[in-house]
Image (spheres, grey):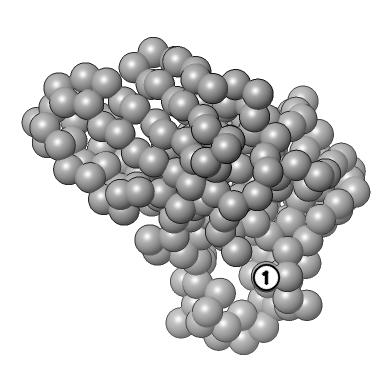
Amino acid sequence: DTGVSQNPRHKITKRGQNVTFRCDPISEHNRLYWYRQTLGQGPEFLTYFQNEAQLEKSRLLSDRFSAERPKGSFSTLEIQRTEQGDSAMYLCASSSGRGAAFFGQGTRLTVV
Amino acid sequence: SQQGEEDPQALSIQEGENATMNCSYKTSINNLQWYRQNSGRGLVHLILIRSNEREKHSGRLRVTLDTSKKSSSLLITASRAADTASYFCATEAQGGSEKLVFGKGTKLTVNP
């Protein structure tokens, strides 16, 4: 499968715990995006990378959130001290340039 | 913040009928894209229309773009039960940012 892969698919965590999600983009894509989606809403932009450089971050990305793409390949999104409001679907997408983005299946986070 | 606004929020039709969804946006754009999302899954890119294009076709899909009105429409002809999904428009704004800004989506139900 050469699509965008996200792990885990589901994560249940207790409030206050840290969680980390991984995204493996399509191998030839140099751009990687993270979005968050809550029920009944469209995806909201969090951050994006071109190769290993993080070029833009949303104001939604509080200091509890950090994203990395260390070698310009896979990316991780970490949420520290999770809150119930962090419960959402976290979507990763990749692209080779401006234009169509290819999304993974998402990681559904539930904070209890 | 979400730039696009889809209309209607929900649409229910019979198999074989056409479905039309509309999208309005606020700023000048490089391109506008339509995505489809089945319940609880990732998004699938359907079609991209650039700001200098007015109409585009792909199979049973027809997209129009009116930049003077900052609006777009997606027409699905001869709908099938398998077209049941949420449909989102997303815009890439002019001026450097490569992020996509999504609307809240139209939930389409095609009844067999």
Q: Position of residue A94 (x, y in %)?
A: 68, 37
Q: Give the percent coordinates (x, y) of residue B98.
A: 75, 43
Label 1 sits on residue? A60
Please state if B62 lies on the left or on the right of A1 as rendered.
left
Q: Residue at 70% across / 35% down in the picture?
A: B30
Report whether residue A30 is seen.
yes
**Vertical side of A10 occupied by B94: above or below:** above
Q: Is residue A37 left or right of residue A32?
A: left
Q: Amino acid at mark 1?
A: Leu
Q: Farthest residue toward the front? A: B68
The N terminus of chain B: image quadrant: bottom right
Residue A3 figure quarter: top right
User: Callout 1: few (<14), some (14-19), or many (20+) C-alpha neighbours within 10 Å?
Assistant: few
Tally of marks: 1
Q: Residue at x 89, y 46 (%)?
A: A52
- Decide which of B35, A64 is in the foreground and name it: B35
Q: What residue is drawn where x is 17% and y is 43%?
A: B12
- Element type at marker 1? loop
Q: Is residue A7 visible?
A: no
Vertical placement of B105 versus B60: above or below? below
